[in-house]
């Protein structure tokens, strides 16, 4: 039983990591925290808005921002993912 839970956790972690790497190229990170965690959902919405603004800045500057804007988008996607994981942890502890 413990082995099954551990294996599932590792698979889920890998999926989240892959999602964080893929998201910036495919679009803004999703808002996938439910209303139960209103503040965390709001944080994800703000992250999504920030990602869109950074993307617009890249387009306005012909993507000549030294790779920093792209890295910022990656970090925003990572932050959104961490918020999702925090909400899931909170669900498991209640």
Image (cartoon, grey):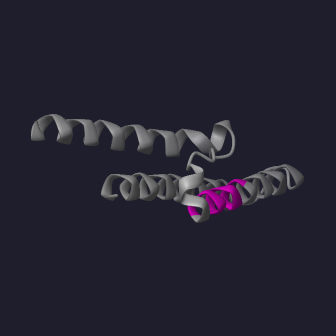
Direction right: furthest residue:
60
The residue sitting at 26% across, 41% down in the picture is 10
All told, the count of numbered labels is 0
Image quarter where the N terminus lies is top left
Q: Is residue 53 above or below residue 21?
A: below
Position of 87 with respect to 75 (left or right) is left
Position of 88 with respect to 50 (left or right) is left
- Relative image position of residue 64 (x, y in whole percent): 78, 55
Image quarter where the C terminus lies is bottom left
Q: Quadrant of residue 67?
A: bottom right
- Relative image position of residue 19 (x, y in whole percent): 50, 40
Q: Is residue 23 magenta?
A: no
- Relative image position of residue 34 (x, y in whole percent): 57, 49
- Relative image position of residue 83 (x, y in whole percent): 50, 58
Q: Is residue 52 above or below residue 2?
A: below
Position of 43 with respect to 15 (left or right) is right
Name the one closer to the observer, 4 or 14. 4
Name the one closer to the observer, 4 or 51. 4
Q: Quadrant of residue 72?
A: bottom right
Q: Main secondary structure of the magenta part?
A: helix
Q: Is residue 41 magenta?
A: yes
The residue sitting at 60% across, 58% down in the picture is 76
Name the one closer to the observer, 27 or 58. 27
Name the one closer to the observer, 66 or 38. 38
The residue segment tinted magenta is 40-48
């Amino acid at each position: 039983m413990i082995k099954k839970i551990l294996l599932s956790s590792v698979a889920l972690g890998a999926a989240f990591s892959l999602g964080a790497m893929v998201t910036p190229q495919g679009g803004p990170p999703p808002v996938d925290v439910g209303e139960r965690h209103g503040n965390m959902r709001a944080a994800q919405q703000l992250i999504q808005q920030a990602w869109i603004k950074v993307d617009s800045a890249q387009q306005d500057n012909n993507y000549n921002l030294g790779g920093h804007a792209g890295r910022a988008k990656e970090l925003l996607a990572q932050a959104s993912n961490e918020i999702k994981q925090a909400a899931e942890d909170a669900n498991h502890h209640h």
